[in-house]
Image (tube, rainbow, N blue to C red):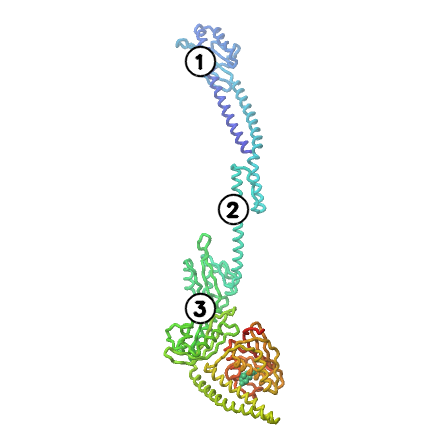
Amino acid sequence: MGITLLTSSLVLVVIALSYILLEYYSFKKSEKSNLQTVGLIIASNSSAAIAFDSPHDGAEILAALRANKYITAAALYTAEGKLFARYPDDLNTNSLPKTISEDGYQFKDEYLEGFQSIRQKNLYLGKLYLRADLTRMQQQIVLTATTSLFLIAAVLILAFLLSRFLQKYISRPILELEKTARFISEKGDLSVRAVQRSGDEIGTLTRSFNMMLDQLDSKNLEIHAANEESLKLAAIVESSGDAIIGCNLEGEIITWNQSAERILRYPAEEAIGQKVEFLVPSSEASLFKTMIKDLDASGGRKPVETILVRKGGNNPDISLTLSPVKNSHGVLVGFSLIARDISIQKQNERILAENEEHLRLATQAAELGTFDLDVRTARLVWDKRCKELFGVEDQDEVDYDNTFAKHLHEDDRDRVLKVIDNLLYNRFNNGDYDIEYRTVSPAGKVRWVRAMGKVFFDEYGKPLRFIGAVLDISEKKKEEIRKNDFIAIVSHELKTPLTTMKSFVQILLSKAKIAADEFAINALSRTDAQTNKMTSMIKDFLQLAKLEEGKINIVKGEFALCDLLQDTVAEANLLSSSHSIEVAHSDRGLVLADRDKIGQVLINLLSNAMKYSPAGKKIVAGCIREADHLKVFVKDEGVGISPEDQKHLFKRFYRVDNEKIKHISGFGIGLYLVSEILKYHDSEIRLESEEEKGSTFFFYLKIQESPH
Ligand code: ADP
């Protein structure tokens, strides 16, 4: 408002001044021309008075000037310059000019005066002097100035009032804008907005102000988010297990996280500000230089294995990555070092390399072939010796179906593939593999080998890798075959006389019963039981021989498992006087199996339970339904089996070497047969046992259908 008033008053003053000046000059000009006109008239009128030398006439002519009250003095001078007449009469002659001057009028302080020549037909007669009072002009100017002043004042008051009235249309939105701005700057709250009241420039200003606030607000949010992000990043850097070291372009360390402190043992205060080269041992200096040089090269940087300096020595092996740090314009401003301590990994690698070398030497010395099957990709790797054992050329590629399976002896193929299938996909086993089979080379050469290995599973029980070694056992096998043949022949030869013996014993027994010869009945019953025992032993031997040759014949049929168990228990009870076996559970269920062979399994388990528990101890057998399987168990309270022996129990000819059971005779083939027979039934023998407490042997068979 001040500006408006000042501007208007300045304009008004300039106008008023110009007006006053204009008036002053035009007044002067008109005064001068008026006086000239009056002068010309009086001069021409008074020429006669001077010519005729009549001062009286002259005075009269001058008296006519009375009509013009502003002319305060007038005089006529002769050609010689002598005063001729004056006006007014009482005018003091001293106030008149003493000498005459050129024609023309000049302004003097408060009046205008001048001379006019008096002529008659070119004859110079004298001069007229006129003086006009200028106070009128001054009064006029004073009046004009005062009026102007009043006018200016009035206009200014009007302008003031008008501005006051109009300002609300201009200042209010500006004031509101100012209030909003102040609120924001004081409270820092960017969510408030100014109200737009019009569509004019101020409205546009408000809109722009609000838009600016919007942008500021969103920028603020972005900055906030970026801040949070950088806080998070800082926390990640700080908690990272890797040393993360930030450097500027000069290579000076500017950040140093906790892991840097832990791995390199320098506290942050010691490291920050130093040149990063102090961490690089002289042996690694050139590598580091190349890494720095390649810093700006495009493409992913690979970690490099190196060594960094650790405070106090024992420099760690490090996997080091150097990355450029760029600003938002993509200009390189520094670089970061990410150092992972790989000392332990390196040490393990060294140990592993040594172990591998030992293993390589050992396998070489033992002439072991090795295999490695990646189950997920089905990629099979054989070493040279393994290829040799299968009769495959060293340079040939191998795979599971076309090399391994194809080179198995056809009598062994199904058995071996089934075992491996079970090993990989049957969740019950622990992945251990130990098997003997024959390989056939393309030229027809047959070799007996023993393969041992292990399957490794992931946490979901899925097979990952199957690795192991293969050993040529052809020589040993030939020996065994000879032994087996011998056993088979002997067993077979023993069987015939035993059968004859058994039939005579039975005839004698029935005769003794008729004769009621108690002694004979007793003696013959025992002989019969012993003959049965011998028959069962010979049966085991024959079975073993068949198994070894892979000639075991499984004839499956449906039968009720618990009936078989009860029959077998009854038979065993008949044979034994020292123990009585109890059948605790007999859940019903049909199974599809070789009744004879499963019977053999049960006899073996029951006779072991009796053999390896002191007389009179309890033996319980049973058949329990669990989901769609029948679990058969034989539980005794005998000597029990140590965990170490449990591992080998099902191997051929394995017998526990123990003082307590030294006197108990046996061949160590019963449990081997049990285990092998169950394998042919997609099952396995398992046991829970504790020394001195007793053992429970059990196995599962799948139920065919429930009897109604
Ligand atoms: P054998 O009984 O002819 O020695 P087996 O193969 O039947 O052969 O048994 C192997 C070994 O397992 C036995 O020598 C014995 O030490 C141990 N064994 C088998 N069954 C039991 C059992 N129920 N309790 C304790 N030890 C047993």
- What's the CA distance linking mark 2 and mark 3? 56 Å
The answer to whether the residues at label 2 and label 3 have Cβ atoms under 8 Å apart is: no
Q: Name the front one of labels 2 and 3.
A: 3
Disc number lying in front (2 or 1) = 2
Question: In this rendering, is residue 131 above or below 323?
Answer: above
Res. 584 visible in picture: yes
Q: Whole-percent x and y of residue 180? A: 57, 42
Q: Where does label 3 land, which residue?
A: 377
- Give coordinates of residue 547: x percent, y percent: 48, 82
Return the mark for residue 215.
2
- Mark 3 element type: loop
Q: What amino acid is at disc 2?
A: Gln
The amino acid type, in three-letter code, at marker 1 is Gln
Label 2: element kind: helix
Q: At x 42% / y 57%, what residue is drawn?
A: 296
> Which numbered disc flags the more N-terminal residue, 2 or 1?
1
Which amino acid type is shown beneath numbered disc 3? Thr
In this view, which residue lies farthest toward the front? 514
Which residue is label 1 attached to? 116
Q: Secondary structure at mark 1?
A: strand
The location of residue 536, given as percent across then percent down, is: 53, 86
Give x and y (percent) for residue 464: 48, 70
The one nearer the camera, 382 or 650, is 650
Question: Is label 3 or label 1 in front?
Answer: 3
Distance CA(mark 2)–CA(mark 1): 85 Å
